[in-house]
Image (spheres, grey):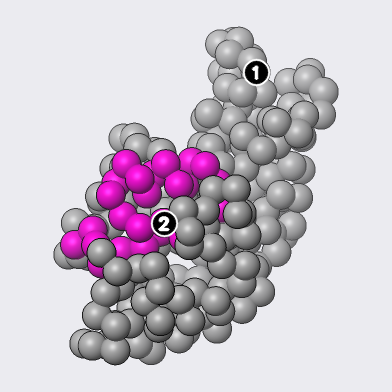
Amino acid sequence: MKDGTFDGKVRCVVYDCDGVLFDSLEANGRLYNDLSARLGKGPLSGEQLKYVHSHTVFESIRCIAREDESLEKKGLELLKQTDLGHYIQYLKMEPNLLQTLGALKERGTLRAVNTNRTTSMKYIMERFNLWPHFDMVVTALDVKNPKPHPESIEKIVSALELKKDEVVFVGDSQVDKQTAETAGVRFIAYKNPEISNGLLIQDHLELLELLRSGKGLSI
């Protein structure tokens, strides 16, 4: 370990939110099924649920409205009237997350969140008292181009004065993988072997061992 970082190679771990920090399938399913019902649509299909899990709320409402502009506009208005805090209670924090974040902080490794969530992220950070655990949080509202565009990663790299080869991005979706690839940072798949480039963890504590060993992380 050099200069407080794991083997001098990784200075910052960037996390996706949904599916990585939290099991959010139930929370997202409830929110978007409720919006779909209020728009006169039926329950979301499996493909739609998968889509809303990794895209912005604006893209998700467009998906539910099936690109009907008037329905999409109504969906956005309904969203403004929705208490997003109600759905946060259905989030389930992933096992060993806080322990891992604490270990990274002790070793001087920066932690950031890169999510396509919008206004709901601040409620999540407050409800689960996550602000002390992260050095930076970037949502879809903080960039012109959300994931999979590289802007969000580039914003983190610039603000925290990092080099791209000092960053790893932990994600669970194809959108996350594409974001890492377009941004030119290393990607670690979380609980999804289908998107792994050879780096895969099933538990957050495995990240600590991966970083200590440097296996597969050398540039």
Tell me which residue sits at (62%, 37%) in the image: 52
Q: Residue 15 carries which label?
A: none
Circle 2: element type: strand
Q: How crowded is mark 2: few (under 14 residues within 10 Å), some or many (20 or more)?
A: many
Q: What residue type is labelled 2?
A: Phe
Given residues 97 and 213, the one toward you in this image is 213
Q: Is residue 35 visible?
A: no
Would you say residue 142 sits in the magenta stretch? no
Single out the residue that lies furthest toward the right: 42
Q: In which quarter of the image is residue 73?
A: top right
**Where does residue 77 sit, x and y in percent of width and height?**
59, 26
Name the mark nearer the viewer: 2 or 1: 2
**Where does residue 47 sit, x and y in percent of width and height?**
70, 31
Tell me which residue sits at (53%, 28%) in the image: 59
Image vertical order of residue 94 relative to residue 41, above or below = below
Spatial separation of the CA atoms under disc 2 and disc 1: 33 Å
Q: What residue type is labelled 1?
A: Ala
Tell me which residue sits at (52%, 53%) in the image: 196
Given residues 62 and 199, the one toward you in this image is 199
Image vertical order of residue 99 relative to residue 181, above or below = below
Residue range of the region highlighted in magenta in the rendering: 163-188
Image vertical order of residue 42 relative to residue 51, above or below = above
Q: Name the residue under label 2.
A: 187
Asked whether disc 2 touches disc 1, contact meaning CB atoms under 8 Å apart, the reply is no
**Where does residue 138 sit, x and y in percent of width and height?**
38, 53
Q: Name the residue under label 1.
A: 65
**Where does residue 213 sit, x and y in percent of width and height?**
40, 81
Would you say residue 182 sits in the magenta stretch? yes
